[in-house]
Image: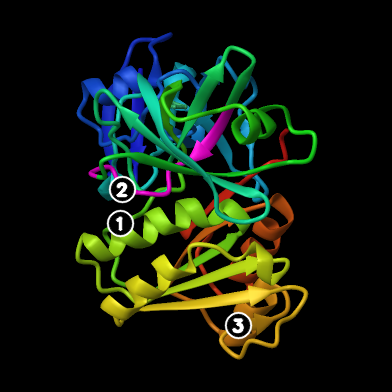
Amino acid sequence: MKLHIQPLDRVISATPGANLLAVLREHDIPISYSCTAGRCGTCRCKVIAGNVADTVNPGHVIDAEGGQYVLACTSIVTGDCTIEIPEPDEVINHPAKILKATVSAVDRVTHDIVRLRLRTAKPLEYSPGQYATLQFTPAHVRPYSMAGLPGDDELEFHIRVVKDGLVSGYVDRELKVGDTVRVSGPLGTSYLRTKHEGPMLCVAGGTGLAPVLSIVRGALESGMRNDIHVYFGVRSERDIYCTDTLAGLAERYANLKVHVVVTEGSDDPALRSGIVTEAVAADWSSLAGWRAYLCGAPPMVDAATLVARERGIDTNHIYADAFYAKT
Ligand code: FES
């Protein structure tokens, strides 16, 4: 049985019923993966032709443009096929781990955002922009994005406290310094791509700033000199946080520009009033050749994806992480 691998234009052989990720790895095909259990999405491949059965998502995942995708780690090859692997030059492999961590700080940074810092016994390897699942107790488990970088002493997370929220309420009211937290990860495909020289658009809504901070710091501190435009959208001025960190980075790195956009408006001349995605659309008539990192609530991410596509960003270069409302 033959597998044709694009865009490498390589043909490899496999036995029917073999796990797709195992076959790719056996033949040294550069494929990103992390959880190996169908959860993180990192190993998503496009099926161009032929037979691959995804045991977790039978019938393949169909995207908006009609492509058929499978998760290599949960798929078996059942016949000759052509597979497109994502960005072979941007491969990341951080095998998912479960680590024990201790709360080193838990602080309110706005009226409804808590910044949580955890110290792990062993370092968590991840790429900027990825997330992990935090288990505070067996009944209190949620995914949150890392706001820092892998080399930092502590893991940092930004948690919006939702009214009557089960997990966020627990973090806000009961979690304390010294408590133990189980960290599982890394997860997620919206991580920093380092092998391009074009500009980067980063749009963050609310605590979507956490992965954006990680991506921006990751880019700047690894020496990327791409122009980076961060658009941070908040509802009102009291929702603004971490702008001192962004301002400090912008002072050190001339290629970083930060735009804070307040939906309800502001009298502060340093801030912009309006909808964050409209600010992006107003500023740029073309974004061809850019990469986009979009993090926040689903309506914001959807609107930003639309703007990015309309302004010419290749769909494959839009990395979106929507935070679905959970308690
Ligand atoms: Fe396949 Fe995580 S490695 S979904």
Q: Position of residue 136 (x, y in %)?
A: 54, 21
For residue 252, side relative to residue 58 (left or right): left
Q: CA distance from mark 1 to mark 3?
A: 25 Å
Residue 137 in which image quadrant: top right
Q: Secondary structure at mark 1?
A: helix
- From the image, which quarter does the N terminus lie in? top left
Q: Position of residue 180 (x, y in %)?
A: 43, 19
* Disc 3: which residue: 271
Q: Check mark 2 vs ligand 1: CB closer than 8 Å? yes or no.
A: no
Q: Position of residue 114 (x, y in %)?
A: 57, 45
Q: CA distance from mark 2 to mark 3?
A: 27 Å
- From the image, which quarter does the C terminus lie in? top right
Residue 182 in which image quadrant: top left
Q: Earlier in the sequence, mark 1 or mark 2?
A: 2
Please, what is the three-letter code of the amino acid marked with disc 2? Leu
Q: Secondary structure at mark 2?
A: loop
The answer to the question of whether label 1 and label 3 lie on touching residues, with beta carbons closer than 8 A, is no
Q: Earlier in the sequence, mark 2 or mark 3?
A: 2
Specify the label residue 149 is tagged with. Answer: 2
Q: Which stretch did the figure color magenta?
A: 142-151
Quick check: can you spot residue 200? no
Q: Residues within 10 Å of mark 1 (few under 14, many from 20)?
A: many
The image quadrant in which ligand 1 is located = top left
Q: Residues within 10 Å of mark 2 (few under 14, many from 20)?
A: many
Which residue occupies 38% across, 25% down? Answer: 102
Q: CA distance from mark 1 to mark 2?
A: 7 Å
* Disc 1: which residue: 218
The answer to the question of whether label 2 and label 3 lie on touching residues, with beta carbons closer than 8 A, is no
For residue 224, side relative to residue 106 (left or right): left
The vertical placement of 229 against 114, above or below, is below
